[in-house]
Image (cartoon, rainbow, N blue to C red):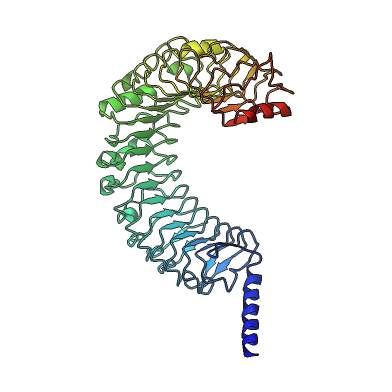
Amino acid sequence: MFQLVVITLLLMQCCQVATRLAVCKVYNMTQVDCSGRRFENVPDKLPVFVSYLDLSGNLIAEISCVSFKGLGQLKGLNLQYNELSVTRGKPFSGLSTLEYLDLEGNRLAAIPENLFSDLKNLKILILTSNTLAKLYPSSFHGLWQLNKLRLNRNAISTLPDGIFRESTQMTVINLDQNKLSCFPQTALKPLLKINEISLNRNSFRENCAEVGLGHFTALEKLMLSGCNIQDSMLDNFNFAQAPTLHDLDLSSNNLKDPDAKLPVNVTVLNVDGNAISAETLAVMLRDLKLLKVKSLNLRGQFDNPSQITNTTFKGFQGTNFQKLDLSSNYIYVLPHRVFQWLQHLTTLTIENNNLYSLSRGVFQGLDRLITLILTQNNLSNITQVSQSIADLRQLQFLHLNFNEFSGQIPPGIFETVPSLLVLDLSDNSFTSIHPNSFTSLPNLQFLDLSYNAIQYSVPHAAFSFITSLQTLNLTGNNLGSWIPYFDGAQPLKGLTHLKGLSISCLSPSIWYSYLRLQ
């Protein structure tokens, strides 16, 4: 009888736990998902074995010292997008094993002193998109193992001295979109292992103290986009003192004719959205012997088409640029051999311009170019484009989508670049495919012809020469009930490597034809 009573009590207890968790999902007995349940409080009596708890998307407005009591094995806690504005006492006490804490999208206006002091093993802390304006010197004390901290999209105007005194293991900090008026040099000084600092879209003033970037001996990436930086302010950053810095973002500032010394080892430089001419930038880099830059972003730099001449990039001769982005300018024509000075270029992006034609030889000198992106222009002559890239013997990726091409895709197109692996002709107005359109592209693996105006039948030999083709996209055309058997042959015959086929409005026979090849 006694045993029966004990068993009954145990069953009742199990049923109570099951009832509490009925509205949550439990995975592998260690992960509990209570997201989006409209809870106004942290559910009580959660299983003590849980290692990951997801409470995101609820209505929790307050947490206290008993909210997570007994969850000593918790390693991940997600509280993002609640209504959290009040923390009473030390709600995270007892969570010494916690490694990940996400508080994004709440209403926290301040971080109380020693709020996280019990989280000795926390590695990632996310406080994005709160209303944080008040931080104390001890707000982050106790976070000895903190590696990544996200404070972006808040209202922080100052960082108290000593706030990161105990977070010396930090490698990444994000302070984007706050109200900082100067680089927080003193507050960040303890972070000797910092690898990435992001301060995008703060508004710096002119009379800030000098920044000793040389102090951060591990710094590799510095993001300063949209910080209202002017030419006269660049010297304050002492970029030349940062020998490890290789990725620098100065985009969307007020730079016009900067003469400050830039990091000697920078390999990625973003200056789009400024008023620096390519000629000025070339002179600056040449005079400073900055020859290690591999990626240069000049999006939106040219508001006058006449700014692009055949000597525009002459100053870059001898540099190691591998990537050049000229997107979102007003370029409608490119002069002959305009890129001849950029012999190391592997990726060229000229997206979202007004190009209506490309002359033969325009890309001469780009012997190492692998990727060419000409998306969203006004190009209409596919044969002319094919002739213009005749010198690009190493080209593998060609994007011509969202242009003005129409009519039939002519025979032998792009025969001068048999190395092509990817060809994107989508979102144009092609109406038909010639049987020999792609005969010269035996290495092509991806072909996108989607959203054109290709009518009904496709020649049976159209794709038979592309023996390496793995993905073919014909979605959004007017193929109707395309019959795979045409003149006694199959349009997909020979495509033994084909893994992806996307065609709208297919008859069952085309699927049968495709499946027989698998």
Rendered position, 21 above or below 302 = below
Give coordinates of residue 122: x percent, y percent: 41, 62
Give coordinates of residue 130: x percent, y percent: 52, 56
Give coordinates of residue 488: x percent, y percent: 68, 15
Residue extending farthest to the bottom is 1
- In this rendering, would 281 be left or right of 33? left
Residue 465 visible somewhere in the drawing? yes
Where the C terminus falls, by quadrant? top right
- In this rendering, would 324 be left or right of 432? left
Residue 310 picture quarter = top left
Q: What residue lies at 36% left-to-right and 43% top-to-bottom? A: 222
Between 222 and 413, the one nearer to me in the picture: 413
Where the N terminus falls, by quadrant? bottom right
Give coordinates of residue 494: x percent, y percent: 57, 21
Between 310 and 260, the one nearer to me in the picture: 310
Residue 506 visible somewhere in the drawing? no
Between 356 and 474, the one nearer to me in the picture: 474
Between 451 and 7, the one nearer to me in the picture: 7
